[in-house]
Amino acid sequence: MLRVGLLVVLGVLCISAPTFAAGDAYLQELMAQAHAAGLAADPEWLALVHYRANLILPGVTGQADDPDFYLASDGKTDPGAELDATLRAFFAPAVVETDTVQHPQCRFIARYEWLKRSLHFDPQRLPPQSCRRFRKWRAALNASALTLVFPSAYINNPSSMFGHTLLRVDAPNQDERTRLLAYAVNYAVGSTTDNGMMFTLKSLVGAYPGLFSISPYYVKVKEYSDMENRDIWEYRLNFTQEEIDRLLQHAWELGPTRFDYYFFDENCAYYLLSLFDVARPSLELTDGFRGWVIPVDTVRRVVEQSGMLAGVVYRPANNTRLRDRLARMSGAERQSVMRLAEGEPQGAVLHDLPAAQQAASLEVAYSLVRYQDSAGLREHSEAARLSRDLLLARSRLPAGSNVIEPAVPAVRPDQGHKTRRLALGLGRRDGRNFQSLAIRPAYNDLLDPSGGYTDGAQINFMDFDLRHYQGSGGVELEKLSLVDIYSLSPRDEFFKPVSWKINTGIARTRLRDGEHVAVYHTNGGAGLALGSWRSAVAYAFVEGTLDIGGRLQSKFSLGAGPSVGLFMQPYPSWKLNLFGRLQNFAMGDKHSASEVSLAQSISFGRQRALRLTLSDKRERGAEWHAVALGWHWYF
């Protein structure tokens, strides 16, 4: 028996030896052709293997952090070695495909198809594999168009505070309703139990693995629109069928690949652009994004490409629809909605209303209960019971209530001001004139030009201000805000959000001898806001402040106190914010501090603004006034 087995093995080796030799000869021939054509430096190859030029040293580095993505031992930094190793892998013997096993031609099908086109593979000398799993997956997608999807910013979730982007794969003959059944390509961190602060800190250093995934689009709509109440913008793109096929081939080979997720640059928005660069290498969309990649900036970059945009669809969140319907109701109608949502007997609430108003009240009450359930504002079983009762009552009435969809915002996210800001200014503080230069890499504050951003959401990162004071010999750092977040959410009888704020970074405080010194400053608090962004919003907070510095008594100062403010927008281009604060520092360097300021901004278009700030401050027994005038460019 052993002798028979040995003869079989020897026979197979004898038969296969010429094949291996022929394959090796063809491999060397293909490598020579690739080298002669300079394919390792071709932009499409660099995009396929996710190489990026090094920031300082010459050469490139691959951004994938999964060792299985690179077939050469030095493939992460040597595109030529990776190309040779890829060609060599394509000559591997055929395998039986399973959920975990693929032939290299199938595992790296985008690389295979590109090299096949570039080198004109001879199918007799390099037999193509069937790639059954990929063909089945591609047929199920039935892709004929691509749509870039932008769920708006969600300030209460650190991973989405700048917004998010994903890609919808549209099948033929779908309309705006049936497109919910399409599939979405998404890049994100997998599920984690870390809280918001821990997520932000760990994602700054790439501690989370980011993965591509494909899921039904309606699942993402439910997550963003229904659960997080985020409006969704859909940008339908003009890609050819050939480009769509290339993108999906690359999405397939990226499926199991890990990329370390970085909050500011290698995030969802950046890697989605990398898919477009593979589909159409001439776009070079990822070029120019260094250090900061804000999702809305990537949407703007795509839209600005000539001929890329085929159309835009606005999909308002359930909360947006609910607020819009409530705004159209009379006071009596709103009161009936509230009573129904509180579970009062329907007959007592609706008995004297016309059928149309009964239907509208029941529909809006149902939406309100569903909102309260998704927001965790009422017990789920109670919400489910009441929702069922409201739906049953509505079903007994005639169909056809006149539901008006919310108006499409006049300014899309991609049309708002750009997220970087440069400000040149001059002013006077404590009797001394100064000139200032301020730069903010990201993203938006309350006084920036209107449109395209969430009302009441301020997110500034790495905002620094340099000043030169009259009579001084140099330039000094006035402030460096590492993070400055404001969430102002007006309350009413239906919605009762808590407003909050947090900022931390370098700031200046006045000592008892009159010198302004730099300290590490952290301030935060929570409060309430009332009013409407269409008229005025008044707000009040309870705040705490911690200053740390070597010039302070006890090296620190800890205090707390109230603040109040009034935000107004008399005209679309004119915003003003009147603000007052009192802090009593009872620990460390004990003192009291107060501040009153009026900041006004007049916009000239969406990328220019003039800002004037007047302030009066008292600190450690001294009082001083300041005025600052600045011209802002958004880029």
Image (tube, rainbow, N blue to C red):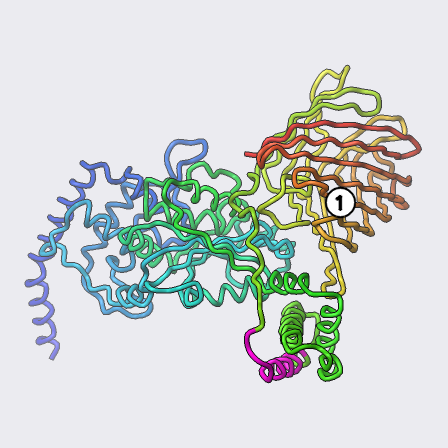
Verify whether residue 399 appears in magenta: yes
Identify the residue position indicated by label 1 in the image. 567
Q: Around disc 1, counting alpha carbons within 10 Å, would you say few (fewer than 14), some (14 to 19), or many (20 or more)?
A: many
User: Which of 557/600 is in front?
Assistant: 600
Magenta stretch?
383-400
Q: Is residue 189 left or right of residue 308?
A: right
Query: Residue at the spot x=27%, y=56% of the render?
Result: 109
Quarter-wise, where is residue 362 in the image? bottom right
The quadrant in which the C terminus is found is top right
Query: Residue at the spot x=31%, y=59% of the render?
Result: 144
User: Which of 583/381 is in front?
Assistant: 381
In terms of secondary structure, what is the magenta stretch mainly? helix
Percent x, y of residue 118:
19, 45
User: Which of 453/167 is in front?
Assistant: 453
Percent x, y of residue 503:
72, 44
Query: Residue at the spot x=57%, y=67% of the render?
Result: 403
Q: Please, what is the three-letter code of the amino acid marked with disc 1? A: Phe
User: Which of 519/582 is in front?
Assistant: 582
Count the marks. 1
Verify whether residue 208 appears in magenta: no
- Which structural element holds mark 1? strand
Percent x, y of residue 176:
43, 63
Q: Determine whether 175 is above or below 21 in the image.
A: below
